[in-house]
Image: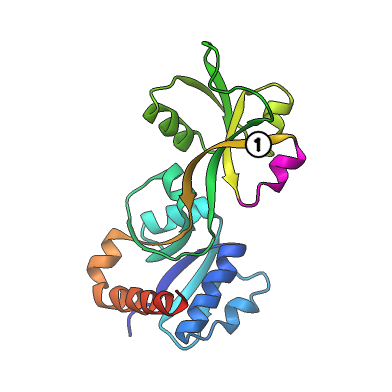
Amino acid sequence: MNKPLRIALTKGRLEKDTVGLLEKIGFDCTAVREKGRKLILPVEDANAEVVLAKANDVITYVEHGVCDMGVVGKDTIMEMQGKFFEMVDLGFGKCKFALAVKKGSDFYGGYGVKTVATKYPNITRKFFEDKGMDVEIIKIEGSVELAPLLELADGIVDIVETGTTLKENGLEVIEDVCPISARLIVNMVSLKLRQKEIEDFVELIEKNLERKA
């Protein structure tokens, strides 16, 4: 028997949604649901195992081939880029990137270079480059909403789900950057060496997504 297909899952909500999808396909994910502190867990009735990791690490593990596949948000894929195949839009984990500013402020007015705070400098840079606009980007690790309130930045580019946090902090979305959802990614070498296994797995997932639609 081949070594188990190793699938890296982003911890948290995407992990729960992916496990739910695997169970709909018919896999027994009891070990994953009852994981305790374990980080590598068997999928009992399939030749597969799940690795739980942070989003950025999912991409690193798949790119380096220590995991054959991974489930990660499009936001992380766009920010980190990397060499792998993006196979399926899983349709869950939906949200969007948006440009938000202090309510009532005129971001596009005036002639000075605007300052934008974000956790995602690469996505932000590309967004403004595509507009032909020169901006200064400041990378923030924590609550990006603070930057305009402290007058560190004229605006922020961040992930928005409901917009409640923005509203509560006196900010408003003035432009959508792009939509986001969870994606299944596959290591390039794994797809060659284990083509049938991976293609069968992808087909099962796609069939299940069609049923959900």
Work out which residue is located at the far front of the displayed protein and give it. Answer: 104
- Residue 96 at what x, y percent from top left? 53, 48
Q: Identify the colour scheme used.
A: rainbow
Q: Residue 141, how many percent across, how many down?
A: 63, 37
Could one spot residue 111 in this view of the protein? yes
* The magenta segment: 161-169
**Res 39 seen here:** no
Please tell me which residue is depicted at 59% across the width and 84% down the height of the picture.
30
The image position of residue 11, as x and y in percent, is 59, 62
Vertical placement of 162 versus 118: above or below? below
Q: Dot 1, how many residues are within 10 Å of its Cα: few (below 14), some (14-19), or many (20+)?
A: many
Q: Picture quarter containing residue 33?
A: bottom right
Residue 186 shown left or right of residue 122 in the figure: left
Q: Which of 109 and 58 is in front in this view?
A: 109
Q: Residue furthest left?
A: 192
| Placement of the N terminus among the 4 image quadrants | bottom left
Residue hosting label 1: 172
Residue placed most toward the observer, 8 or 14: 14
Give the tally of numbered discs: 1
Residue 205 within the segment the image draws in magenta: no
Asked if 95 appears above or below 209 in the picture, the reply is: above
Q: What residue type is labelled 1?
A: Glu
